[in-house]
Each structure stands twice: as structure tokens, then as C-alpha cells.
Amino acid sequence: MNNTIKLREWELSDASSLAENINNPNVWDNLRDGLPKPYSEADGKEFIEFVLAQPKPATILAIEVDGKVVGSIGITLRTDVERITAEIGYYLGENYWNKGIMTEAIKQMATYVFTNFPYLRKIYATPFDFNTASHKVLEKVGFEREAILKQAAIKNEKVVDMYYYSLFRKD
């Protein structure tokens, strides 16, 4: 892999690239349903403005490859008794699949999260059962499959299982 991959904070100028990469049924089919469909540049600007208004350190970062934003990665900090965990979510434009980019992005994000949120003990992900590429990339990074959550979600009018993967702080 010869690509330079880095995570960085979002900029308003990224809205066009955001819309270009997420406005794809093959990407959308692996994400939660909260995203607008179709996804416009205006949706991208609204999302970026929301992200930039959040407290620091940032919890949602742009994935940049060779100077171009091609995806997003972020965490949702849990609360109450789960306040020591965070859920990770991510997407990558289809033109960038199968190049090792997401593996590197998740590694970088895990380092970022455990450095900037020292109270977190665990990062977890819940990909759909049919998203085998996501399962593989999580395992490559060191996430452990803890459970299969049977009939836990509905995607495209079909009830599906979700896999529960975790990465634990090493200290």
C-alpha cells in the first residue's frame, strides 16, 4: 500500500468529497439508516458544521488519503454505567475498498481514542452479519468477536444479526 493515510478534523471544504463518497448504495447498505438518502453536499455541510460544534477532543474525524477525504471514522461515547466504552463507526468510499485503508484508519483511530480519552477501557463495533469485509478489518486490527446479537437490527427491510467486536485498552 503506497497511500498516505491520515485522520484529521473535518473542514467545511470537505462537504463535496463527503457527499461523493457516501452517496453510494454499496456504502449506504453497510451504515445505519440515519443518513439522508440521497446524500447531498448540503447534507455534508450540515454534518460537518455539527461535528465542528462538538467539544474537543474531536470524536469524528475525516479519513484522508493522498490529500483527499475519502471517508469518516468516529466514536460515540457511551454514558452512565457504560461510560468507559465507546462505539466506533466508519465508512470508506467504494473506490477505496480493499486497499488496506480502513485497517490503517481503525488502527490510527484506536490510538487516538485511547490517548485522548484515557478513561475508556473498550472500543466496540457492531457490523451487520453480511458485512464480512468489516468483520475482517476489525479482526486484522485486533478486535475480538465477543458475541453475535441475533435479530438485532433491520436493514433494507430485512431483519439481520449484528456482530459485537471489542478492542480493549492495553495497560
Image (spheres, rainbow, N blue to C red):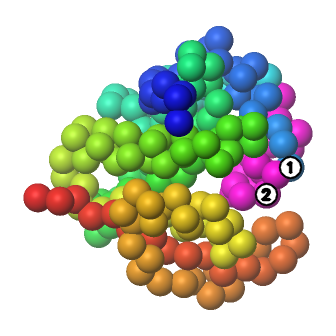
Asked whether residue 78 is in view, the answer is no
* Crowd band around label 2 with a 10 angstrom C-alpha radius: few (<14), some (14–19), many (20+): some
Residue 53 vs residue 149: left or right?
A: left
Amino acid type indicated by mark 2: Asp
Q: Residue at x 55, y 40 (%)?
A: 101
Relative height, residue 44 to residue 59 (above, below):
above
Task: Decide: is 51 above or below 133.
Answer: above
Place of residue 4 in the rendered image (x, y in percent of width and height, measured from the top left): 49, 25
Instruction: Give the amino acid type for the residue marked by disc 1 in the picture.
Output: Pro
x 66%, y 75%: residue: 129
Which residue does the numbered mark 2 point to in the structure image?
29
What distance separates the C-alpha of mark 1 from that of mark 2?
6 Å
Crowding near the residue tagged with mark 1, few <14, some 14–19, many ≥20 C-alpha atoms within 10 Å: few
Residue 122 lies in quadrant: bottom left
Q: Quadrant of residue 139?
A: bottom left
Left or right: residue 132 versus residue 114 is: right
Hey, which residue is sitting farthest bottom in the picture? 150
Q: Which residue is more in the foreground, 38 or 53?
A: 38
Along the line of sight, the residue nearer the viewer: 15 or 20: 20
**Is there a contact, CB below 8 Å, between mark 1 and mark 2?**
yes
Residue located 65% across and 30% down the image: 70
Q: Quadrant of residue 153?
A: bottom right
Q: For numbered disc 2, what is the local secondary structure?
A: loop
Q: Answer left or right for 88 relative to 14.
A: left
Tell me the magenta residue range: 26-40
The percent position of residue 54, horizontal first and vertical second, equals: 44, 30
Q: Is residue 114 above or below residue 48?
A: below
Report the residue that reaches farthest toward the top. Answer: 13
35 inside magenta stretch: yes
The residue to which callout 1 is attached is 25
